[in-house]
Every structure is written in structure tokens, then in C-alpha cells.
Amino acid sequence: MISQKRVVQVTLLLLLLATILHLLEYYTALQLPPVVLLTSRLITWVFFVFYAIRKKSLTTWILLSMVIGVEIGLNFPHFAQHLSVLSKIFLSLVKTIIAPILFATLVVGIAGHSNLKQVGRMGWKSIVYFEIVTTMALVIGIIAINITRAGTGIVLPEGFDQELPEAKAQKWSDIILHIFPENIVKSVYHGDVLPIVVFSVIFGIALAMLPEEKKRPMLNFSESLAETMFKFTNIIMHFAPFGVGAAIAVTVGHLGVDILTSLLKLLFTLYGALIVFLGAVLIPVAVFLKVPIRKFIKAVSEPVSIAFATTSSESALPKAMENMEKLGVPRKIVSFVLPTGYTFNLDGTTLYLSLAAVFVAQAAGKDMSIGEQLLMGLTLMLTSKGVAGVPRASLVILLGTAASFELPLWPIMAILGIDELMDMARTSVNVIGNCLASVVIAKWEGEYKEPEGEVNFD
């Protein structure tokens, strides 16, 4: 029987061969028959399927579904658009979990321990860490786009047309008012994470102040609700490969390659800047705090793959919370830091927005000083709070800021052509950053307990 290691080696070798053939076809005068290219990919995918069957891991099946989704999107672009119903079903199912799981875990975390001072302490520690890290992301984004100058000389392809979403500049008062729920049912309906967190924290504090006989029934209910919703999450995750694969197929089928080739420089700038951010900021933080890197990667691989395909951090939240708890972060810290981070710690989105805003100025031929770029980036960082659960909501933020700084909208129309590919990367970094933040705060609080031996995160 062939070992799993051998199957992985053969799969990677075939993938490398298929990639080389496609690059030769695309960038050289060599004309290969389409059947050769298709066959090279199909043989690779067959070995991947064989490995997934042997591995029996949900994460592996999600990755395989993304590969199949790419293939469907490339070869059957019109059919791929009909698969959007599967991705929408998955996202809808995930969104039903968010409000009850946040409410239950936060209430149990606060009222179950009755340590109200710790809630305040976790709050200021989280905010300090979030703002330091997102500021570094902002600076890296501005530096990257000034090095590559991807916006200089950009030209929209003839006949290219994209409908821009409506947007208006946000005032600071709008941002603050959005934090506090006027109607908790309305917040749950719209999937607004931060108002739900604020309501749950205040509810948990109120419950902690009650005498034991009045507090216990509600606490028992919340504990039971939390456990039920984690089981609910496990059931839904079995549908994840179908939802994720469909999302990728729709994206690839919709984009094609024409607009992509004209904007590759911008795309590579973003991906390169995000890799630099991971390598220069998040990894050093993890190493300095002695976070178990290998276990952390295993814990975030499934939430990140879900976020990458669906372009929504919200879709990865339930699994991320569950896996961080398995990694040794107490539930009371996970349930506080992760949802709060989805508002204040959008590392990937902040980096993207600073990079994209300067790209728009470069495309318009407007020379901005570093000071002006930083001011625009800080404005974007403030107005982007709370967009994690909405796919491509950062475009609306970018449009509003462009209007405030008197920048033209046509470069944003160009960005819209590849925004789905960019959203995949920045959303993935958002999830990684928030998962790491939960470990950082747990270690800062002295409550992190690394699990012994191997941990099953599927």
C-alpha cells in the first residue's frame, strides 16, 4: 500500500509539472494542445482525491473542494455561476450560529467566573494589541504600494464595466453609534457582530451581579446553549467542502483571465505585502511569546481555508473559536477576543485599504506626500471597523474615503475586477491575526495552557 507521504510527494510533483506546462503555454511561444494541459491537471487532482480519501480530514476535503472549484470555474464558467446557491446555503447556515454562540460564550465567560475586573483588563489589553498590530499593517501596505507603484500607468480594458456599490463617507460619530445596539434583534438580523458583543458583555455583567439562586438558571441555559451551538457548528462543517468549492467555482468562472492579467501587479503587491506582514509581524509575535507554531497552524488551517473561499471572516468564526479553545485558550478569552478582533483587529483589511487607496491616487496621477498617505490610511483604518462579516464591504469603505479625499472612482472600478481574489487573501490574514490575538491575550493573562500531545482540530 502506498504511504500518505509518498502520495503527497507524487501529488506535489505532478502539480509542479502541471504549473510549468501552463506557464510555458501562457508566457512563451510554445503552443501545447489543450488536452495536454487538461490531462496534466486531472491526473494531479486524481492523486489529490486519493490522498484526501486516505487522510479522512475535513481540512483536506475543503482544500480538495477548492481545487475542484477552480477546475469547474475554468472549464465551465457559465455552469459555475449556478453553484452560488451552495455557497449561499453554507454562509446562511454559518450566520445562524454567530449570535447565539457569541451570546452564550460571553455570558458564561463573564457571569460564570464573576471576575468583572478581568473583563476590563482583557478589554484594554486587546485594544492596545489590536491598534499596534493594525498600525504596522497600515505602514506595510503604504510602503509596498510606494515600492511597486502598481497604480502608475494602469488602463482599464476596453469595454470593461463594473457596477460600483453605493457609498458615503462615514463620520466618527457614525462609527461610535454603530457599536451600541438600539435593538438586539435588529443587530442579530443584520449580523452586526460588535453590537451583539456589547449587549452580551453587559448582560453577562448584570447576570454576575445577581445572587446565586437567581443567576444559576440563566447560567445553566447559557452553558447548554454554548455546547449545543458548538455541536451545531460540527454538523454544518460537514457541508463546508460543498459550500467552499462552490464559492471558488463562482469566483473563477466570474473573473476569467483578461482583467486579471492587466492588474497582476496590484494583486502581487497585495499578496507580497500580506506575506511580509505575516513574516515580519505575526510570526515574530508568536515566536516571542512561545506560541506552539505547528499546533497553531493546524488550528487555523480550516478556519482560514473557509475564510479564503467565502471571503467572509464571519464564516470562519465558529470553527476558529472552537479550535482556539482546543489549542488551550480559555473559552472566556476566546469568546471575548475573537469577536472584538473582528471589529478592531482587521490586519489584512487595513493593509489592503491603505495599499488600495494609494493605488487609486497613483492611477489618477495625483502625487500624495507620505503624510497625506498616512492620514488617508488612518481614516480608512477607523472607518473599516466592523466590516469583517460582510464580503467585499471594504470596497464601500474605500469608495467613501475616495470621495472624502477627492479621488476619482474609475480606478476603484478596476480594483473591483479582481477584488474577490484580493478579498480572499486579506480575509485569511484577518482570521490568522485574530486567532493569534486570542493566544496573545491568554498568555498576557497567564491563562494559556498548551495541550499535551496531538490535538484533532477537524
Image (tube, rainbow, N blue to C red):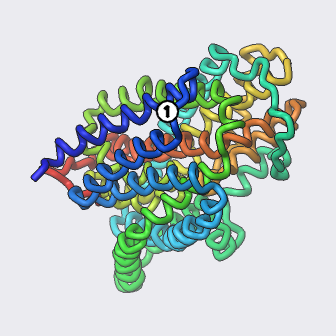
Residue shown at 76%/47% (left/top)? 396
Residue type at tag 1: His
Whether residue 162 is situated above or below residue 113 in the rendered picture: above
In this rendering, position of residue 118 left or right of residue 346: left
**Res 260 quadrant in image:** top right
Q: Secondary structure at mark 1?
A: helix
At 37% from the left and 32% from the top, the residue drawn is: 17
Left or right: 432 as drawn, with respect to 387: left
The spot of residue 265 in percent (x, y) is 64, 24
Q: Residue at x 67, y 42 (%)?
A: 419
Q: Is residue 308 visible?
A: yes
Name the residue rendered at 85%, 23% in the picture: 364
* Foreground pick, 389 / 2: 2
Could you tell me how many numbered marks the image carries?
1
Residue under pointer 1: 22
Asked if residue 137 can be seen in this view, the reply is no
Q: Is residue 391 above or below residue 400?
A: below
Residue 316 position, x and y percent, is 47, 57
* Rendered position, 75 above or below 443: below
Q: Is residue 77 left or right of residue 49?
A: right
Residue in front for this viewpoint, 124 or 311: 311
Q: 209 or 106: nearer the eye?
A: 106
Q: Residues within 10 Å of mark 1 (few under 14, many from 20)?
A: some
130 and 89: which is toward the camera: 89
Q: Is residue 156 left or right of residue 448?
A: right
Indicate the quadrant where residue 236 lies: bottom left
Q: Position of residue 308 (x, y in %)?
A: 50, 48
Q: Position of residue 319 (x, y in %)?
A: 40, 60
Rendered-image quadrant of the C terminus: bottom left
